[in-house]
């Protein structure tokens, strides 16, 4: 940073979107790392204690701050990066508002130790609640260390809003991961309570992706589309996918942004290639003229406005599509269902239409099936007993007979419902008895590579996971070890299951809610698939277990497990008078 630090003229300060910069420790971590990047650092080390609430230390080997500018650096609206309002139109630095250090100083006990390349010594500046209380020489190699202690100690209202140390740590690690992906040539380490959560060596995007995505990085393909809107990056093969969108990092001009349109552009490239409800992961970097990007639209700079969004959208979508085609990854097989769907809707009524007819005919579809006509009565699975299997038809639907009528069963949804109910019953029984839930020890421990942040999410949810019978523990950076899974999950692939669980985990919600969410996902993994062939004994067993499962007719995701065609519906469907 060669330009001196100057106080912004008031009109510039006013032109800058106001707002809270530091709303949680992760935001402070992000701002401090961005300062280090703006200072040209090649290496940034982040240390967190207590999720960053107790202590955040960010050390870099960047240009440093001259001693006579240290006090200005922590003053509000003081920046070396912007001189006039016009500069706002083409910001190339990550920071530009000159309020991060001031905001952090206002809510913490702040120490900055910095030394410029030419200086003989480093200087230390200490502030408490925004007031400078110390400024003296200190020892340090060239570069800057910023240490913020007791974050939000003087703003209890803000403190009350935070989620707990582990969630805050997870968010902070995530912030560093995002920066490692947007600045892959810079080395990053992030420690959380002395545990190494992330190490990106600064060797380029592939290394950074390996650090952030762990073993999943091997499933990424290269995106490389030069042009005025350049799109590069690494995106997941269609066969690897996740339950949420959070694994997709979008970077615009080296800034990680949250932009729904661009996420949609990436997802569109996968259209027809991913199962419903599944999402790609990876990193997509868009590089374009800075004048086309308005970075000054969000207080924490997490959103940007694109001047030619349509054009950028098209470029991203094409680049990702081309990358997937070129990688020729199961494209032919994966596209078939979509093509079938298109043909089906044109030539003959598709499955949607058939279902509608059944409903119109008064089929006994579940009350909570969603878009069907309102049902008069809440039905229960027990009402169908005894349920006798007749056949497995078409794609795998079971056809069964009950005293109530002909019953069509979705074996996956039914099995899912059974397992979900068993998992929760077991967890409740174990909790009541004060013991662990019945678990099945794995013959060989499964070690799963996951996001650094996922390890934090796991730790945050250990109570809910252990309550169901999972035995999980951190195992080195970006890895977790699974020793046992719930008995009901015995048939699931433990690696995929654990990975998906950690992916989907949100720490929000009380224990019961989180447990239900985890149980639903576990059940989904362990249940038979719709296409699986079941012999007659397996069919009978599944139906027996189904009719003793309490609750309504839907699976944990709210889809029907059975469709009942009773005599009345069949008579109506065939145009016969009611009996
Ligand atoms: P901004 O980044 O928007 O300029 P900040 O409050 O984050 O505002 O930082 C104020 C100024 O302090 C920066 O403009 C920069 O000159 C200086 N500064 C902050 N952190 C560092 C750092 N790690 N290395 C060098 N200079 C820094
Ligand atoms: Mg800054």
Image (tube, grey):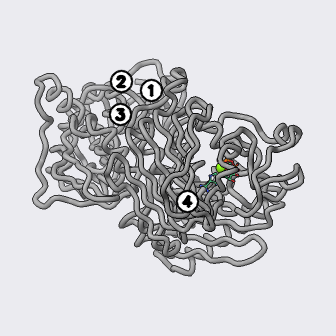
Asked whether the residues under the numbered discs 3 and 1 touch, taking CB atoms below 8 Å apart as contact, a structural biologist would say no
Q: What is the secondary structure assignment of the residue under circle 1?
A: loop
Residue topped by disc 4: 121
Give the mark nearer the N terminus: 3 vs 4.
4
Looking at the picture, tell me which residue is in the foreground, 85 or 504.
85
| Distance between the alpha carbons at the discs numbered 3 and 4 | 52 Å
Quick one: label 2 or label 4, which is nearer the N terminus? 4
Q: Is residue 162 left or right of residue 412?
A: right
Mark 2 secondary-structure assignment: loop
Label 3 and label 2: CA atoms lie apart by: 27 Å
Query: For the point 66% across and 42% down, which residue is it?
Result: 74
Mark-to-mark CA distance, 1 and 4: 75 Å
Q: Secondary structure at mark 4?
A: loop
Contact, mark 2 vs mark 4 (Cβ under 8 Å) = no
Instruction: Decide: is 323 above or below 1.
Output: below
Q: Are marks 2 and 1 in contact (CB under 8 Å)?
A: yes
Front disc: 3 or 2: 3
Examine the rendering and report whether any part of residue 282 can be seen. no
* Residue drawn at the location 69% of the way across and 50% of the way down: 68
- Look at mark 1 in the image and give the residue it sits on: 367
Q: Given the current orientation, which residue lies at the most extreme top position?
A: 376
Q: Which residue is mark 2?
A: 379
Tell me which residue sits at (49%, 45%) in the image.
Answer: 147
Q: Secondary structure at mark 3?
A: helix
Going from N to C along the chain, the mark reached first, 1 or 4, is 4
Distance in Å between CA atoms under marks 2 and 4: 78 Å
Mark toward the start of the polypeptide (2 vs 1): 1
């Amino acid at each position: 940073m060669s330009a001196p630090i100057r106080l912004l003229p008031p009109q510039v300060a006013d032109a800058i979107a106001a707002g809270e910069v530091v709303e949680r420790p992760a935001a402070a971590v992000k701002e401090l790392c961005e300062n280090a990047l703006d200072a040209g650092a090649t290496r940034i080390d982040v240390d967190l204690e207590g999720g960053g609430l107790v202590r955040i230390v960010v050390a870099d080997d960047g240009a440093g701050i001259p001693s006579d500018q240290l006090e200005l650096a922590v003053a509000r609206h003081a920046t070396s990066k912007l001189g006039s309002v016009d500069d706002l139109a083409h910001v190339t630095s990550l920071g530009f508002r000159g309020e991060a250090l001031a905001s952090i100083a206002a809510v913490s006990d702040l120490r900055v130790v910095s030394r410029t390349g030419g200086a003989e010594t480093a200087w230390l500046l200490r502030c408490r609640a925004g007031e400078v209380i110390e400024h003296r020489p200190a020892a340090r190699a060239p570069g800057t260390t910023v240490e913020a202690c007791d974050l939000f100690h003087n703003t209890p209202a803000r403190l009350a809003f935070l989620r707990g140390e582990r969630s805050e740590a997870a968010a902070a690690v995530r912030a560093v991961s995002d920066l490692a992906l947007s600045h892959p040539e810079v080395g990053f380490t992030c420690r959380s309570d002395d545990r190494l959560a992330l190490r990106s060596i600064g060797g380029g995007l592939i290394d950074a992706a390996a650090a952030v995505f762990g073993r999943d990085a091997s499933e990424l393909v290269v995106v490389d589309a030069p042009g005025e809107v350049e799109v590069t990056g690494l995106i997941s093969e269609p066969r690897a996918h996740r339950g949420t969108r959070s694994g997709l990092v979008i970077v615009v001009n080296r800034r990680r942004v949250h932009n729904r349109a661009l996420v949609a552009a990436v997802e569109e490239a996968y259209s027809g290639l991913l199962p419903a409800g599944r999402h790609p992961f990876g990193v997509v970097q868009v590089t374009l003229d800075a004048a086309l990007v308005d970075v000054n639209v969000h207080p924490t700079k997490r959103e940007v406005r694109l001047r030619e969004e349509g054009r950028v959208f098209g470029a991203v979508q094409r680049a990702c599509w081309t990358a997937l085609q070129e990688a020729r990854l199961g494209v032919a097989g994966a596209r078939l269902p979509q093509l079938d769907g298109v043909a089906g809707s044109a030539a003959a009524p598709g499955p949607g239409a058939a279902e509608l007819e059944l409903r119109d005919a008064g089929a006994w579809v579940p009350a909570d099936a969603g878009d069907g006509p309102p049902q008069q009565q809440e039905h229960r699975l027990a009402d169908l007993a005894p349920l006798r299997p007749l056949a497995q038809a078409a794609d795998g639907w079971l056809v069964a007979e009950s005293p109530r009528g002909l019953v069509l069963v979705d074996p996956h949804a039914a099995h899912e419902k059974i397992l979900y109910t068993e998992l929760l019953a077991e967890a409740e029984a174990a909790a009541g008895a004060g013991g662990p839930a019945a678990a099945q020890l794995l013959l060989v421990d499964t070690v799963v590579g996951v996001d650094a942040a996922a390890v934090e999410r796991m730790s945050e949810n250990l109570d809910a996971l252990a309550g169901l019978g999972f035995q999980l523990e951190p195992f080195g950076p970006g890895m977790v070890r699974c020793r046992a899974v719930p008995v009901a999950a015995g048939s699931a692939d433990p690696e995929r299951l654990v990975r998906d669980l950690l992916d989907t985990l949100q720490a929000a919600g009380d224990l019961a809610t989180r447990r239900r969410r985890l149980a639903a996902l576990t059940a989904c993994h362990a249940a038979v698939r719709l296409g699986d062939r079941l012999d007659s004994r397996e069919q009978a067993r599944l139906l027996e277990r189904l009719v003793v499962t309490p609750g309504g007719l839907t699976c944990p995701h709210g889809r029907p497990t059975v469709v009942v065609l009773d005599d009345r519906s069949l008579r109506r469907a065939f145009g016969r008078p009611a009996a």
